[in-house]
């Protein structure tokens, strides 16, 4: 896929706003919609140090949409509905993300509302108990979702602190928080330095920059530093749960973001465990019938690179499932990648790039993520060019070197269910 094939050829407008926040705009006037991804440096990693101290960032995020500016919760959400805005707030290790999609003609009033949401949230005390109840229900709901429970446990053990904190928070913290501490935390953390505002779709870059400079003129400062990074906990963990299923999660090391091996490693992981043609699916699920689901994924980050392998099976087959997965990992690292596997993965990469160009929300998210993780955004043409440089020989060499001897000998292992295979 060449740059000429990535039409339309879109440019990314980058600037630092007067307040210090980074603005990224990728206009595409062939689309009728626009999407915004606003990343604020207030995440779970800034919660007090110590296991079980999560919850402050989660409560901040949940209270954000309960009114802003001079509008109470009902009036604020009615305004977003009248504008046709699809809005979501989510909390992550180093940031809170506000995502919004809207028709391009309604982007400017939407930005006005979101600026109120970020800078002037009401966080009414009357909403504290309902929000607290919702957060506690989400924690309780993990018992009905063993896959997510296994994923949470894996992240806690395989990812270095403070990036391993729970996006659900801990029960004790959520039960004890008062409204003053929540408001103070948001005020302290919600700063323009480190914030990223990415917009894609039907948008005028100059007009939106002028609007944001005016709306954010009084916003200033930098957030508190994240706590010092700690080594991952590692090891095995069995979470006992009465069930007819067992969910397995394995965590292994992968390259960091911007490592030269990042893209070839991702290609290898997709051949290993993405889709019905992957090695794990064919040899663990289809050939041996050991599990109803098996997959692999890779999440590169500037602080860590985590490869996750997950499987869902029954208690009587869990030990054999784990053995079969480990055998396949050893075989994959030893024998490398087949040319046909490389061709399938490369076609999949190109399809995903084409699909990204059709979604303003995906592009806004990708721009902000690249800025946060890589220090600069990448265009669709940049992504296509990177994929075009991949060769079977390059990916095969990275698979053999990165996934060969020693890679899978000591993974982090999580099991949720009545029995554990370790």
Image (tube, rainbow, N blue to C red):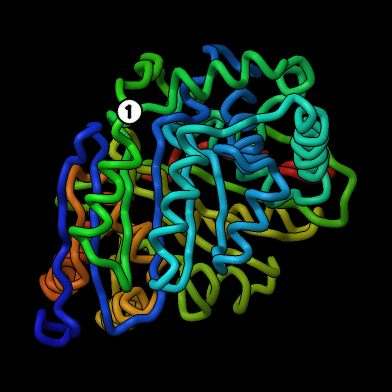
Badge 1 crowding class, 10 Å Cα cut-off, few under 14, some 14 to 19, many 20 or more, is: few
8 to 120, vertically: above or below = below
- Residue 127 lies, in percent from the top left, at 76, 33
Q: Nearer the viewer, residue 422 or 240?
A: 240
User: Position of 313 compared to 229: left or right?
Assistant: right
211 to 26, vertically: above or below = above
The residue indicated by pointer 1 is 218
Name the residue located 65 percent from the left edge and 35 percent from the top edge. 63
SS for callout 1: loop
Name the residue located 40 percent from the left edge and 15 percent from the top edge. 227
- Residue 35 lies, in percent from the top left, at 40, 64
342 to 17, vertically: above or below = below
Q: Nearer the viewer, residue 408 or 83?
A: 83
Which image quadrant is residue 362 in? Answer: bottom left
Name the residue located 69 percent from the left edge and 59 percent from the top edge. 312
User: Position of 351 compared to 283: left or right?
Assistant: left
- Let me know if residue 331 appears in the view: no
- Let me know if residue 51 appears in the view: yes
Q: Nearer the viewer, residue 294 or 87?
A: 87
């Amino acid at each position: 896929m060449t740059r000429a094939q990535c039409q339309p050829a879109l440019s990314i407008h980058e600037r630092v706003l007067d307040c210090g926040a980074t603005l990224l705009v990728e206009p595409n006037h062939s689309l009728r919609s626009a999407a915004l991804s606003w990343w604020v440096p207030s995440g779970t990693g800034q919660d007090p140090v110590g296991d079980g101290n999560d919850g402050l960032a989660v409560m901040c995020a949940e209270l954000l949409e309960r009114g802003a500016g001079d509008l109470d919760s009902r009036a604020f959400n009615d305004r977003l509905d009248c504008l046709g805005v699809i809005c979501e707030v989510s909390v992550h290790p180093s940031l809170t993300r506000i995502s919004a999609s809207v028709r391009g003609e309604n982007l400017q009033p939407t930005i006005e509302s979101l600026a109120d949401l970020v800078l002037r949230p009401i966080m009414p005390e009357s909403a504290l108990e309902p929000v607290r109840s919702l957060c506690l229900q989400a924690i309780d709901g993990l018992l009905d979702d063993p896959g997510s429970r296994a994923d949470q446990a894996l992240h806690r053990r395989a990812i270095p602190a403070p990036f391993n904190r729970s996006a659900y928070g801990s029960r004790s913290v959520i039960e004890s928080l008062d409204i003053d501490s929540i408001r103070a935390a948001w005020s302290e953390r919600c700063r323009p330095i480190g914030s990223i505002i990415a917009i894609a779709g039907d948008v005028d870059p100059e007009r939106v920059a002028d609007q944001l400079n005016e709306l954010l003129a009084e916003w200033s400062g930098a957030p508190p530093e994240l706590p010092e990074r700690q080594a991952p906990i590692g090891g095995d963990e069995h979470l006992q749960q009465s069930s007819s299923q067992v969910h397995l999660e394995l965590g292994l090391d992968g390259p960091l973001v911007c490592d030269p091996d990042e893209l070839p490693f991702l290609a290898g992981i997709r051949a290993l465990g993405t889709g019905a043609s992957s090695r794990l699916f064919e040899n663990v699920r289809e050939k041996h019938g050991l599990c109803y689901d098996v997959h692999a994924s890779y999440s590169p980050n500037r602080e860590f690179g985590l490869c996750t392998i997950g499987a869902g099976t029954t208690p009587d087959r869990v030990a054999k499932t784990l053995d079969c997965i480990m055998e396949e990992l050893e075989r994959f690292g030893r024998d490398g990648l087949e040319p046909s596997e490389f061709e399938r993965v490369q076609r999949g990469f190109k399809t995903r790039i084409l699909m990204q160009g059709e979604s303003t929300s995906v592009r806004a998210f990708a721009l902000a993520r690249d800025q946060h993780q890589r220090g600069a955004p990448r265009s669709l043409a940049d992504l296509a060019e990177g994929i075009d440089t991949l060769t079977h020989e390059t990916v095969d060499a990275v698979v053999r070197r990165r996934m060969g001897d020693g890679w899978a000998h000591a993974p982090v292992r999580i099991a949720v269910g009545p029995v554990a295979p370790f």
